[in-house]
Amino acid sequence: MLAIVGASGKLGFATLTALLDSDMLKPEEIVCTTSSDPGNQKLEAARKRGVQARRAHWDDQESFEHAFQGCDKVFLISSSRIQKDFGDAPEGRGREADHYQALEAAKAAGVKHVYYTSLAFAKPSKSRVMKAHERTEGLYNESWPLYLGHFNFPGDDRTEIPVAGDSKISWTAIPDLGFATAKILSAPSDEWAGKTCYLSQSQSHTLEEVAEMVSKARGKETKVKVVDRSEHEKFYVEQRGMDEAYVKWWSKSFDALRDNECEIRDSTFEDIFAKSGSKPKTMEATITEMFSKA
């Protein structure tokens, strides 16, 4: 029995969909946790197929213990409560506190194997977005607007976008990450026990190259302007009206980019796809599709 924590989120739902649509696991072998009514509604179709949906909340360890009953595997997707990380939160006060709750619950419920999702940065990383991951233990194609100067998709009218650093990034589409993750989760536990792998395509792109793809997709020139981090923070707080704590937390990701942390060299993802006889979606195809649907 597998429990998916955060099954109604982007990666969780993509993984659940792959598990069911590719018949990797039987519906009755899957438990999904959710903490909200919208999340519960999103899982309705899966529940009708035989998947169990159980309530669990980061602030309630007992709810996770109940949700994990009867499960020998847990797929723990990182907490989305990023506000907990703001202001250089000390260890134990950031999002890792949420993860600890789930991990302690897994131990109490007798879970044998935990699969945890991190991000495709170096470890240790200069990026603050990685801190909770480091304390607990691929970058989505679709996350490019965040990296491309908090691009206000799809209506951002800027032609020049300030960023605080640039280098190659290994991007991977969410459905493809879900498929590869599902393959790992449905394999015998000892096949992946104790292993850490990066699920990323071998093809990588800089933000400058991503901006060129955006230009082509929306029919309007888009360029990046690399500035220092303090100038970047000032621009997004004072001229774009964004929350200062959030901007400063995120801006340190560009320090990681400057060190080329996000260009990944790991064949695991492409090996999984090669064995399945399919090909992952390219970054350009993702961007084109996002604009065509907007």
Image (cartoon, grey):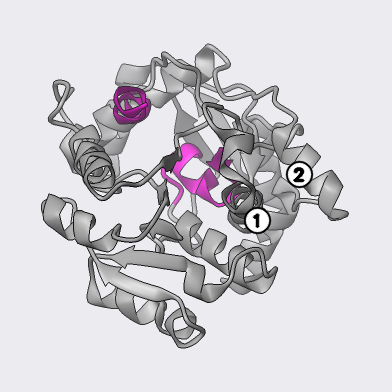
Residue 247, given in percent of the width and then of the height, sits at 27, 34
Tell me which numbered mark, 2 or 1, is placed earlier along the sequence: 1
Q: Camera-side residue: 17 or 66? A: 66
User: Which amino acid is tagged 1?
Assistant: Phe
Q: Secondary structure at mark 2?
A: helix
Magenta span: helix, strand or loop, mainly? helix
- Report whether 96 appears left or right of 205: left
| Residue 240 relative to residue 205: left or right | left
Q: Secondary structure at mark 1?
A: helix
Q: Which residue is located at x 30 percent, y 57 percent?
A: 68
Inspect this view and state whether residue 244 appears. Answer: no
Q: Residue furthest bottom?
A: 48
* Magenta segment: 128-151
Picture residue at 75% right of the left edge, 30% below the top: 267
Residue 93 lies within the magenta run: no
Name the residue carrying label 1. Answer: 179
Q: Relative to 135, is 83 above or below?
A: below
Mark 1 surroundings within 10 Å by alpha-carbon count, few (fewer than 14), some (14 through 19), many (20 or more): many
Q: Is residue 265 left or right of residue 38?
A: right
Is residue 12 at all visible to an observer of this figure?
yes
Position of residue 80 relative to residue 19, above or below, is: above
Q: Is residue 129 magenta?
A: yes
Above/below status of 112 relative to 129: below
Q: Amino acid at mark 2?
A: Ile
Q: Which residue is mark 2?
A: 272
Tell me whether the residue at label 2 lies in contact with that at label 1, contact meaning CB atoms closer than 8 angstroms.
yes
Image quarter for residue 248? top left
